[in-house]
Image (cartoon, rainbow, N blue to C red):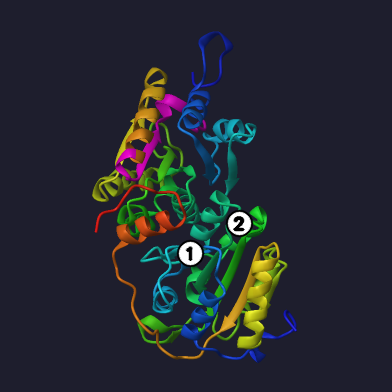
Amino acid sequence: MSGAIAHHNAKRMYRFDLCRRLASKLHREEAVIGGIGNSNFDLWAAGHRPQNFYMLGSMGLAIPIALGVAIAQPQRKVFVLEGDGSLLMELGCLSTVAARAPKNLSILLFDNGVYQITGGQPTPAAHTTDFVAVARACGLGDSAWAADEEDFESQLDRCLATDGPHFIGLKLDDQPPKGQTERDPSQIRDRFMRGLGTKASRILG
Amino acid sequence: MAASDPGRGPAWHEIVRDVLKANVIRLVTYVPDNVLRPLIEGVRADPFFTCFSTAREEEAVGILAGAWMGGMRGILLMQTSGFATLPNVLASLPCAFQIPTMMMISERGTLGEFNIGQAMVCRTMRPILDSLGIEHHTVTRLDECEFIVDRTIRQAIMTQAPAALILSPLLTGGKVVKP
């Protein structure tokens, strides 16, 4: 049952597999914002889509970027994949999201308790902080840990079928990312804008 | 003086509001500031705008970047000390991704500042903007306000580059206390 699982009982899952499950459910040009590092690497590895945005640098800003897209395009569903270390840097953004209450925004939090990309050092929150409880306390009432992959998929179905904002906590295992995003920011931005229909000029090649 | 005076035409904040509208800058995010208050109130009162505060200035840079890519133009209002929290995200988001993030900064720390912290952090503002290659202009006169704000916004959009408008106490009156 969604929402009933305590964070320490949530299954530790494989980030790349979760990204593939998300991608397989997106059929209506939903936007997806991938946070810094391994969060967007696995989004990229799961198969590029024109509506994917891969953040390079600006740690902590994936959720704000997604909020901006959600405000600009209220008819489009927007998903954001953010890491626990990144969210910890910008916790205040959860209150901003709750205050704006965008119906089309779903936040997926990848929580492995460590800064995996820099060698696996534990975050200050690793053993003490329940991010779903934090999200709820910030005003995001529809927040839950995913018990396992099946529960994750049913929560995704709900994100796609119902008004948000939604917040899904995902406990991760320690497997490394499956690939690395091409680091070409202006091309990433250009492709994303074409994917969102905000840029339409012809491209050669 | 900077305050609205019925006999003398529009105040700086009325000019800025109208230029934002003329350039279809619909999204206004801010971290509050005393000097910016009349502009924030003017924008909030106009249904043309979507206007809200964020917990940090950084957050607003992300929101504006997402909104721009989604087809909505915006601006971030803040004061000098708030700008000083931004170099990393400016370098790695609007600068690296070529996103025309518009910033309006109420200048504290000069021309009668009473807070030494503001005075010191103010000195970092223009060197940061210069080292990031961000176009910036300081508005000091009411008769130049419309031209500078309008042209800076247009250039930012056309060149896909972030830009900063600094509101001098010479324009706004600033924030002062008696020694």
> Which residues, given as a range, are shown in magenta?
B158-179
Mark 2–mark 1 CB contact (< 8 Å): no
The relative height of residue A108 versus residue A31 in the rendered view (above or below) is below
What amino acid is at disc 2?
Answer: Thr
Marks 2 and 1 sit apart, C-alpha to C-alpha, by: 13 Å
Task: Identify the secondary structure beneath mark 2.
Answer: helix
Between B26 and A157, the residue placed more toward the observer is: A157
Q: Residue at x 53, y 78 (%)?
A: A110
| Structural crowding at the residue carrying mark 1, measured as other residues with C-alpha within 10 Å and reported as few (<14), some (14–19) or many (≥20) | many
Q: Residue at x 27, y 50 (%)?
A: B132
| Structural crowding at the residue carrying mark 2, measured as other residues with C-alpha within 10 Å and reported as few (<14), some (14–19) or many (≥20) | many
Mark 1, residue position: A62
To which chain does the residue with label 2 belong? A
The part of the image, by quadrant, that contains residue A106 is bottom right
Report x, y in % for residue A149: 60, 87
Report x, y in % for residue B42: 60, 30
Report x, y in % for residue A196: 47, 55
Q: In the visual, does B166 lie left or right of A141?
A: left
Q: In the visual, does A198 lie left or right of A128?
A: left
What amino acid is at disc 1?
Answer: Ala
Q: In the visual, does B144 lie left or right of B115?
A: left
Report x, y in % for residue A59: 42, 66
The relative height of residue A87 versus residue A76 in the rendered view (above or below) is below
Residue B78 is one of the magenta-drawn residues: no
Circle count: 2
Is residue B173 in view from this perspective? no
Q: Earlier in the sequence, mark 2 or mark 1?
A: 1
Mark 2, residue position: A96
